[in-house]
Amino acid sequence: MKKTIAMLLIITALYIYIPAVDSQAAPLPPAPGTSAAAVILFDAIGGTVLYERHADDRRLIASTTKILTTLVALENNALDEAVHIKPEHTNVIGSSIYLRQGEVVTVRELLYGTMLASGNDAATALAYHTSGSVEDFTKLMNARAQELGAVNSSFTNPHGLDGDNHYSTARDLAMIMAEAMQNEEFRKIASTKNITIGSRSFTNHNRLLREYDDLVGGKTGFTRAAGRTLVTAAERDGMLLVCVTLSAPDDWDDHTSLYDWAFSQFQGFRINSSDTKYVTMPVISGTRDMVSARPSIDFFLLARKSDDLTIAIEAPRFVYAGVIRGARAGRIIVKNNGEPVSEIPLVYTENVTLDESERLRGWEKIRWAWYFANSRGGVNYGIAPVY
C-alpha cells in the first residue's frame, strides 16, 4: 500500500486503485487472548481501538509512569542542561543508575537513565530539576495527562513506585504513549537498545526491541503489587500501533501476538498535506504557466487489508490567473468499499497573478475553455484511471 501519493498530472480527476486482498470481506479473525488483567491495542495515528479488555480499569502502573515523566521533562528542558545531583535526588528506593551526590550530569543522561535503565533516581532528579520538587513536577504530569484526555489517571511521583493515589488505565497510557511517540527525541530515546553517555552505559530493559523487528519504542515496569506492566509501540504498513498490558505475566508474548494479528489484518493509508504537487493545472493569462495544489490537511485511514480503497481527485483542467495561495482548488474523495469515508480539500500552493500582456477578452476565454475541454476529454470533472 502506498503511504503517500505525489503525482504531477494535468488532469481533471485522478482515480487510484489500492489493491485489496479479497474484495469479499471475510469475518475479522478474533484477536489472540492475553495474560493481562487490562489490555489495549491502539492506532496511535487515527485513534482507533483495535482490541481492548478492561481498558478503563484504574490500576497500578509501575515504571510505565516514566513515559509521561520523560515527555514532560523533554517539553520543559534542554537536553544539554547541567543537573547538580543533590541528596534528595538519590534518596529513592528501587531501580537506580546510582547517581552520586555532588556529581553533575546532563538532562540527556537522566532521560536515557530513566527510560532504558528505569532509574528511579534519574526520574526523581529530572522532577527536581524541572520543577523544584516532586510535588510540583507531578502537577505538570497531571496537567499534561488531562490535556491528552487521560482523565482516569493520577500521578503522585515521577518513577512509578506504588502509591495510594498513583494509578492509570490501559487506555490512558496508550494515549500518553501515542503523544510521546510524536516527540522526535522521545522516540529516539525509547528505541535505543544500548548507549554510553558520560561515565554510564545503559541497556534498554525492553527486550522486544531486540526480538520484534517492527518495535520502535516502549517502557517496562514491575512492582509486586502492580505485576508486570508493559507499554510498546510498533510500526508497519503505514500504521503506528501502541499496545499496553497491565498485570500481564506473559507480556512479551502478549504484545508480539497482538501485533502479529493486527499487522496481518489491517493497513494504514495516509495523505500528507506536505505533498505540494499533488496535482498541477495550467494557468491561462498568468505570470506562471502552471499552478500546483496540495491537500489542506493530513489524513489517515486505518482499513482492513480486505477493504477496497479508492481515491478520486477532482480539480479544474485549467484555471485563469488571479490564483490565491491557500484558496480551494478542488477535493480528494476517499472511498472504502465504494462508500465515501472522507473528503479532503485541495488548496493552491502559490499565488499566480495576471500577466497584463496576456490578458484575455471574454470571447478569448470562451475559446480557451473550449480548447482545453475538448483536448482533455470534453468535461470539467471526471474520473480517469492511472496505471
Image: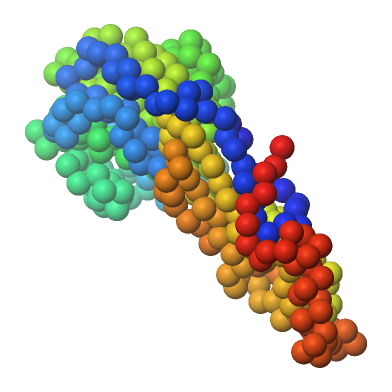
Residue 267 left/right relative to 148: right
Which quarter of the rendering shows the C terminus? Answer: top right
Quadrant of residue 181 within the rendered picture: top left
Quadrant of residue 336 within the rendered picture: top left
Closer to us: 224 or 99: 224
Q: Position of residue 63 (x, y in %)?
A: 29, 26
Q: Residue at x 74, y 78 (%)?
A: 320
Name above or below for residue 25 compared with residue 365: above
Q: Residue at x 67, y 44 (%)?
A: 385
Closer to us: 188 or 12: 12
Q: Residue at x 29, y 14 (%)?
A: 32
Closer to us: 65 or 382: 382
Which quarter of the rendering shows the N terminus? Answer: top right
Residue 275 left/right relative to 101: right
Res 131 seen here:
yes
Res 88 seen here:
no
Q: Position of residue 113 (x, y in %)?
A: 43, 27
Q: How is the image coloured?
A: rainbow
